[in-house]
Image: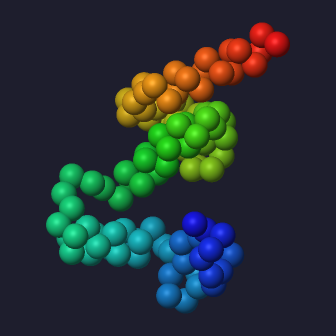
């Protein structure tokens, strides 16, 4: 999706001036958007937590995830311990890795 989006800034999330969002401005925009969409029980910091779980599902290591999200390795581990669903997809990926290792 990013490849098909016109680049207006060197950062992915840019404000209307093409600069990175400040935490305060992004938080305010997030609150306005969630209120307008009538979304409850989601918070600004949930974005990074969701990214952590999606990166894990994409088979990224905890170190890779921490590098992308800016979390510590311990924080990544704690997020995954609490929120990562142990799905069939993850189990199948692990079995495939095991089988590749045996060859």
In-front residue for pair 96/28: 96
Q: Say above or below: 43 vs 14.
A: above
Residue 74 position, x and y percent, is: 54, 31
Left or right relative to 60: residue 31:
left
Q: Residue at x 65, y 46 (%)?
A: 67
Asked if one can make out residue 8 in the rendered structure from this viewpoint, the answer is yes
The quarter of the picture where residue 11 lies is bottom right
Screen quadrant of the C terminus: top right
Residue 97 position, x and y percent, is: 68, 21
Left or right relative to 43: residue 76:
right
The quarter of the picture where residue 5 lies is bottom right
Asked if one can make out residue 78 in the rendered structure from this viewpoint, the answer is no
Q: Say above or below: 67 vs 21.
A: above
Q: Residue furthest top?
A: 102
Number of numbered discs overlaid on the protein picture: 0
Residue 98 position, x and y percent, is: 68, 15
Q: Residue at x 50, y 74 (%)?
A: 21
Residue 76 position, x and y percent, is: 52, 36
Q: Residue at x 41, y 76 (%)?
A: 25
Judging from the image, the colouring scheme is: rainbow
């Amino acid at each position: 999706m990013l490849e098909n989006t016109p680049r207006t800034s060197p950062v992915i999330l840019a404000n209307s001036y093409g600069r990175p969002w400040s935490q305060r401005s992004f938080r305010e925009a997030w609150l306005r958007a969630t209120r307008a969409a009538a979304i409850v029980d989601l918070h600004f910091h949930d974005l990074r937590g969701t990214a952590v779980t999606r990166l894990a599902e994409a088979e990224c290591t905890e170190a890779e995830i921490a590098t992308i999200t800016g979390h510590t390795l311990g924080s990544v581990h704690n997020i995954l311990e609490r929120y990562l669903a142990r799905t069939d997809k993850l189990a199948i990926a692990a079995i495939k890795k095991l089988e590749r290792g045996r060859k």
